[in-house]
Image: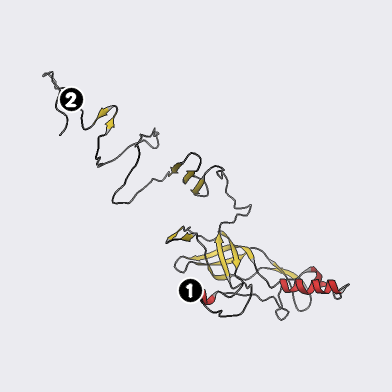
């Protein structure tokens, strides 16, 4: 994990305008400058851009997207890009043995949240651990949360009435509407179910289909009870025998 110190021994550290003055007008100003200088080393959260994602370790390398104003030993100031944050644990929503994952890719925007204490021992072994280092609010101890949008990458067409799991362009979507109690699936690339059995507790209605996506059911399909198609019972229908004038018996 990488770390950029924020103390006077480091030639680069965040600089508050108050610290640029040689003398303070009052004790209050001096104390404010000292406190502000201390705060420059307290990292809380930063937007960042993913450089790479390790799906096996569930960590990423990310570039902080906010530059820091720093002061060199000669007193000059400049804006610098913070170092890459490496081995940052990625946060996916999870609980009860289930996890919602995302195919994180280079260029994705994330929010890095920094722990108040060193996370190295916990990250390595889990459980309750002693601190491997006594650092506080350090750039080394971040967690990456995917999801924030800058105005340059924001998506459009956000539903104001339903919950959606969707592609950014909205072309593929699972939509759950709490008002209508309906779930809608839009899948231009197809919809596949891999299961030994499928149970439908409800009516199977024919879709209207379209020239591009005609409504069809492809078998074999086993139905325990009767099926009615175009008003005709599949299990009870009969046929008229040509020439005999009689109807056949229902299917066995």
- Describe the colour scheme in one phrase: secondary structure
Residue corresponding to mark 1? 127
Residue corresponding to mark 2? 239
In contact (CB < 8 Å): disc 2 and disc 1 = no
In the rendered image, residue 231, in percent from the top left (x then y), is placed at 29, 26
- Give left or right: position of 82 versus 244: right
Residue 19 visible in image? no
The residue at 48%/66% (across/down) is: 58
Quadrant of the image occupied by residue 20: bottom right
- Frontmost of labels 2 and 1 is 1
Q: Nearer the viewer, residue 201 or 14?
A: 201
Up the image or down, 107 lies above or below 212; here it is below
> Which image quadrant: the C terminus?
top left
Up the image or down, 108 lies above or below 227; here it is below
Disc sitting over residue 77 in the figure: none
- Give left or right: position of 251 versus 214: left
- Give left or right: position of 217 versus 179: left
In the rendered image, residue 18, in percent from the top left (x then y), is placed at 81, 70
Residue 111 visible in image? yes
The residue at 31%/51% (across/down) is: 195
In the rendered image, residue 132, in percent from the top left (x then y), is placed at 55, 80
Up the image or down, 69 lies above or below 193; here it is below
- Pointer 2: residues within 10 angstroms few (<14), some, or many (20+)? few
């Amino acid at each position: 994990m990488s770390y950029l110190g924020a103390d006077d021994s480091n030639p680069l550290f965040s600089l508050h305008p108050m610290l640029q003055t040689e003398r303070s007008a009052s004790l209050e100003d001096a104390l404010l400058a000292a406190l502000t200088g201390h705060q420059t080393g307290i990292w809380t959260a930063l937007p960042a851009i993913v450089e790479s994602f390790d799906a096996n370790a569930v960590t990423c390398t990310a570039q902080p997207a906010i530059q820091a104003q720093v002061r060199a030993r000669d007193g000059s100031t400049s804006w610098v890009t913070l170092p890459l944050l490496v081995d940052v644990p990625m946060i996916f929503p999870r609980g009860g043995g289930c996890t919602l994952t995302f195919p994180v890719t280079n260029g994705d925007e994330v929010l890095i949240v920094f722990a108040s204490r060193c996370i190295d021992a916990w990250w390595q072994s889990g459980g309750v651990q002693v601190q491997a280092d006594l650092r506080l609010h350090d750039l080394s101890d971040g967690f990456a949360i995917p999801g924030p949008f800058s105005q340059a990458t924001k998506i459009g067409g956000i539903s104001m009435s339903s919950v959606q799991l969707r592609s950014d362009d909205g072309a593929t979507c699972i939509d759950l509407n709490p008002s209508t109690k309906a779930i809608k699936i839009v899948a231009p690339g197809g919809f596949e179910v891999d299961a030994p059995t499928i149970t439908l507790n409800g009516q199977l209605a024919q879709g209207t289909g379209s020239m591009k996506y005609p409504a069809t059911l492809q078998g074999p399909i086993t139905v325990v009870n009767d099926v009615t198609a175009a008003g005709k019972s599949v299990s009870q229908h009969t046929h008229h025998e040509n020439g005999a004038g009689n109807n056949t018996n229902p299917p066995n």
